[in-house]
Image (cartoon, helix red, strand yellow):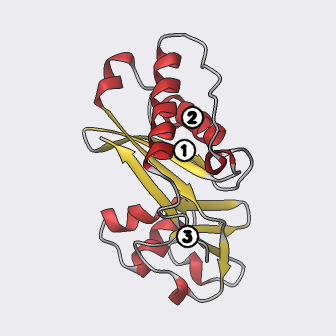
Amino acid sequence: METPEGMFTEVEKRTLIDIVKTVIKCTLEGKAIPKFRIDSPALQEKRGAFVTLKKHHRLRGCIGHIEARKPLYKTVEEMAVAAAFNDPRFPGVRSDEYNDLSIEISVLSPLKRIEDISEITVGIHGIYIVRGLNSGLLLPQVATEYKWDRLNFLEETCYKAGLDTDAWKEKDTKIYIFSADVFGEE
């Protein structure tokens, strides 16, 4: 399985973080989002990505695209707005919160469908579970943060998908794994 970890230079990471900060600040100030000029081939490659915002180490918003539909920098730009203002779990970020936000970006590898859960390595892989119209995804760092083992991770992903926690055992449940290059700024 391809792993994007370490795929980006420090300059490329900084560029993506700056895009998130700029987009959120412009939106808060009612200004137009600038057109970003990106020369890096890695940032122009189509990739799935999530933008996670935390305030004082607590989740404040997290939204992403699993599939690679747009150039990475555009995906990050769009997900920054979505995480800050459109995560249904939270009210939109306010101007007075801006300086308290920490930013984390997770750039995803392509999804790989698995048949055997032993292929899941906690701390390396994220999980995406699909059954019927239900689906749920948890990023690799979530399992590490909560100190889950493989079974807890599968159960929590099922729960997030709105399924019974043991739905991963059913033959019509599809389990996908992916890895992520995760970086950010406090």
Nearest the eye: 142 or 161: 142
In the rendered structure, which disc, 2 or 3, sits on the residue that comes first in sequence? 3
In the rendered structure, which disc, 1 or 3, sits on the residue that comes first in sequence? 3
SS of the residue at dot 2?
A: helix
Nearest the eye: 160 or 4: 4
Q: Looking at the image, do the residues carrying marks 2 and 3 touch, with CB atoms under 8 Å apart?
A: no
> Gap in Å between the C-alphas at discs 2 and 3?
25 Å
Q: Residues within 10 Å of mark 2 (few under 14, many from 20)?
A: many
Indicate the position of residue 185 as horizontal and vertical percent values.
34, 42
Q: Which residue is mark 2?
A: 82
Q: Of tags 1 and 3, which is closer to the observer?
A: 3
Look at 45% across and 67% down and name the residue there: 156
Amino acid type of the residue that numbered disc 2 sits on in the rendered structure: Ala
SS of the residue at dot 3?
A: loop
Residue 78 horizontal side relative to residue 104, left or right: right
Q: In which quarter of the view is residue 93 placed?
A: top left
Look at 62% across and 44% down and name the residue there: 40
Q: Which residue is mark 1?
A: 63
Amino acid type of the residue that numbered disc 1 sits on in the rendered structure: Ile
Q: Which mark is residue 3?
A: 3
Q: Looking at the image, do the residues carrying marks 2 and 1 touch, with CB atoms under 8 Å apart?
A: yes
In the rendered structure, which disc, 2 or 1, sits on the residue that comes first in sequence? 1
Which residue in the rendered view is the most extreme toward the top? 30
